[in-house]
Image (cartoon, rainbow, N blue to C red):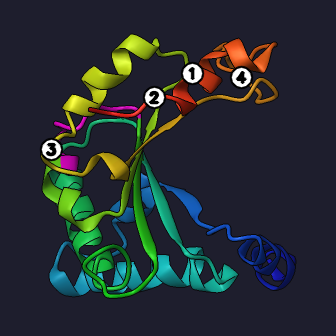
Amino acid sequence: MGFVKTSYVPHLRARGTRVVMTADIGAALDKNFPSTPAGYETLAAKIISEKITQYNLDGIDFDVEHSLKTEDLQRATGAFTALSKYLGPKSGTDKWLIYDTNQDGNTPLFTAVHGLIDYVLVLSYGRSLSGLQATFNSYAGKILPNQYLIEFSFYEENGANWGDVTSPLASSRAYKYTNWNPT
């Protein structure tokens, strides 16, 4: 922890890089906190303390890769709303609130919180270039095109080989992603 806060983060910032931590959406669903405005505020304070302040980071990236049941949807929406006082475009701070997902933009959670987030990071592992626009279209009207980012898988990552990074790099899917922009 100390090295990240005192060496790694300052080194990256000196190079012009912002640093955020990824957290599973489960962090915003903690049932140890009541589903009330006060409970969401306390949960938000815990998340900020443990995931951002402790490491002197620039924000958080919530990984949302499954649909939420009604109770969890309410809890996540409450947590995002409480967090938005300290992170994201409505906070008046420079701390980011990022929505990281493999889902389209018409999910109930994204529909509820889209105005509270800085960026959407869509896991686009193995997706064809021709499908990127359709996914963006599900977000259009809720975010601006410059808030929409696509993510690919590096060849050295463990797990499934999505084939995003291949040699020569200039003909790889990852390279083609870098030249794509939503319309």
The N terminus lies in quadrant? bottom right
SS at mark 4 in the image: loop
Tag in front: 3 or 1 = 1
Q: Distance between the residues labelled 2 and 4?
A: 26 Å
Measured as percent of width and height from the top left, residue 164 is found at 64, 19
Three-letter amino acid code at disc 4? Gly
Tag in front: 2 or 3 = 2
Q: What residue is at 82 percent from the left and 28 percent from the top? A: 156
Q: Distance between the residues labelled 2 and 1?
A: 7 Å
Q: What stretch is highlighted in magenta?
A: 102-110
Q: Name the residue under label 3.
A: 108
Three-letter amino acid code at disc 1? Lys
SS at mark 3 in the image: helix
Measured as percent of width and height from the top left, residue 25 is found at 41, 53
Q: Mark 1 points at which residue?
A: 176
Tag in front: 1 or 4 = 1
- Examine the structure image and report whether residue 28 is included in the region drawn in magenta: no
Q: Is residue 161 at all visible to an observer of this figure?
A: no
Cβ atoms under marks 2 and 1 closer than 8 Å: yes
